[in-house]
Image (tube, grey):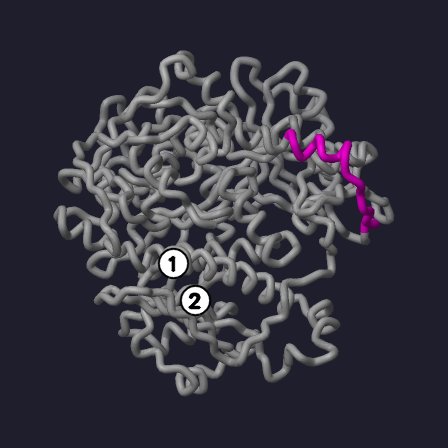
Amino acid sequence: MKKTLLSYILLASFGVNAQVSSVKHVVTKGETLTQIAKKHEVSVQSIITLNPGAADGIQEYQVLLIPKNNRLEHVVQPKETVFGISKKYNIAIEKLQDLNPGLKENGLKIGQKLVLADSSIANQSNNISNTYEVKAKETVYAIAVQNGITVSELYELNPGLESSGLKEGQILKLPTKQNTVQKSSSSQQKATELQGFFTIEVEPKQTLYNIQRTYGVTAQQLMLWNPELQNGLKEGMVLKIEKSNNNASLHANQSAPVAQNPSKVDYKFDQFSNNSSKEMVILMPFNLKQNDPNSSTIHSKISNDVFLNMILDFYAGVQLALDEIQNKNMPLTIHIVDSEESNRAMNIEQLKNKFDFNQTDVIIGPFFQKNVDALSKAFEGTSTVIVSPLSTEKGQPFPNQVHTMPSEDLLKSELIAYLESKNEHVLWIQNPKDKNKNQQYIQRLSNTARIETNTKGNITKSLLTPHLNKQKTNYVILDTSDLTTTIETVYALRDLRKQYDIQLVVLERGANLDSTDVSINDLAELRMIFPSVTNEANSSKREVFYQNFRRKFSKNPTKFSVRGYDVVMDMVNRMHAGIDGNIFEYGSQQIENKFTYINEAGGIYNNGVYILQYNPDLTITEAN
């Protein structure tokens, strides 16, 4: 997706609320963030803090706010929490604590100044300004078109504009991004009245969540088209799905295009020459010797090979990233190399003989963690960064290895940090057979009422009621792998919500929640909170990505496609924003994945986690 100059200026002009004085800088042709930072004697990270969109690249004539020094601070306001501040500036809590000694032990005080230093970045997708500064010779019509709204909407939001006209430097109000998303959703719902449908039959063990991801639709849309879903999803059920230009050709078994690749393909993007040119290698386990793209059996093999299916989906996202990088005109060369990797091993010496890595700055891959560790070992002592794109395994903490997938432990820890920040009433429901499963996390919460089921996993309203608080929000942690406990807890909480403010919380989104015995409507009414590596909430950036993907591949992206795009775009932007060799000091939020790195035990680990919640209208958003 190609950003307009307008969107860059908007992002540059309205920075985060940091206590810092700044000057303006107009980007010249071919200028990089590193060059600008050196010119003003500040860090790249401090520029990104004041200009969130700069993490995605900069353009000629873009106006950047440049801090007069690198000491960026945040003044603590009433009711603010460490969790909230960390999310506002996209800094890991651990990093914020490191920058502010005593914060972990003493907590926050109103008026306290927190050092953000040069490691922060504002949330890129949630802080887009809803105002616009008029440029010389601009017209109302041009501004409306550039911002995707009508002239009537612009006049409605800016009383007096129609009669007085535009003035250079005038600040106009624009619709918020949330309003834009709601209009898009509304138009999709109306389309059901005008378009036809195609049908699918629910397969064994298929879940509502899987159907949503496969066909690129929301739970709200599925309910609208199929009212019988209110009684749960059942095997053999025939569901209607809207047939439109975007999804008419979708099919569950359709995969990303088979890679028509030799063992190595090169992409050179720079159209001007300077000393900042970078090289990236993306290792793809195509195993083309066994998976000949021209074979008559390749499509059958893809259908039966889950790993190959995943790799091709990931590669489709990579290809979309390459399209966007082409538009950015970066001094960069990317090589796609067949790693011939398997879950058993990877021949690193053979790989190094096939490709000269001497000039390589970043390698994305391999995909199996033990192969990532082996490659990191082979490149130990060099400046080459090895990126693990998909594995959730901890692996070995090599200083040149980047773990892009947050661990399961981190997901749970971030959820507990969120609950700590709310300072409300917490109930913990646990089945005896899960007794010691998550003790270390729950113990962090003070004044937690622990409720244990009987050996059969039964839970009742009478068991819960004595522990509920009518003056506070009751966060009820359902910590069990038992289906009976899950079903009975949801039913009991659903009825008790008439008398108490209750919100359901799960430490992980397990298969029990997709059971046909658990209604998604009940989970939505209970505003269920859960941690997630990906954020699937609607956003204008996500919608554009989906449109571009469908246009290129005639299907919706899977989570692996989005991951392929996000990992590549994040690393490419870091390669061109880093200064003095440090490219992991700021956070980045891409389409569905967040990348906020900390150094742990000598390795580089991603702490980018979302805390999401269901809403009564069946949408999923970030928890407040």
Mark 1 Cα shell of 10 Å, populated few (<14), some (14-19), many (≥20): many
The amino acid sitting under disc 1 is: Met
> Looking at the image, is 582 positioned above or below residue 453?
below
> Looking at the image, is 327 positioned above or below residue 285?
above
Which quadrant holds residue 120? top left
Determine if the magenta segment contains residue 198. yes
Determine if the magenta segment contains residue 563. no
Q: Is residue 186 visible?
A: yes
Tell me whether the residue at label 1 lies in contact with that at label 2, contact meaning CB atoms closer than 8 angstroms. Answer: yes
**Residue at the location (56% across, 47% down)?**
437
Query: Which residue in the protein does label 2 denote?
Result: 364
Residue 64 located left or right of residue 458: left
Residue 58 located left or right of residue 230: left
Residue 571's label in the rendered image is: 1
Marks counted in the figure total 2
Residue 606 located left or right of residue 341: left
The amino acid sitting under disc 2 is: Ile
Which quadrant holds residue 518? top right
- Measuring from the top left, give residue 596's x and y in whole percent: 38, 48
- Bounds of the magenta span? 186-202
Q: For numbered disc 2, what is the local secondary structure?
A: strand
**Residue at the location (33% across, 66% down)?**
400
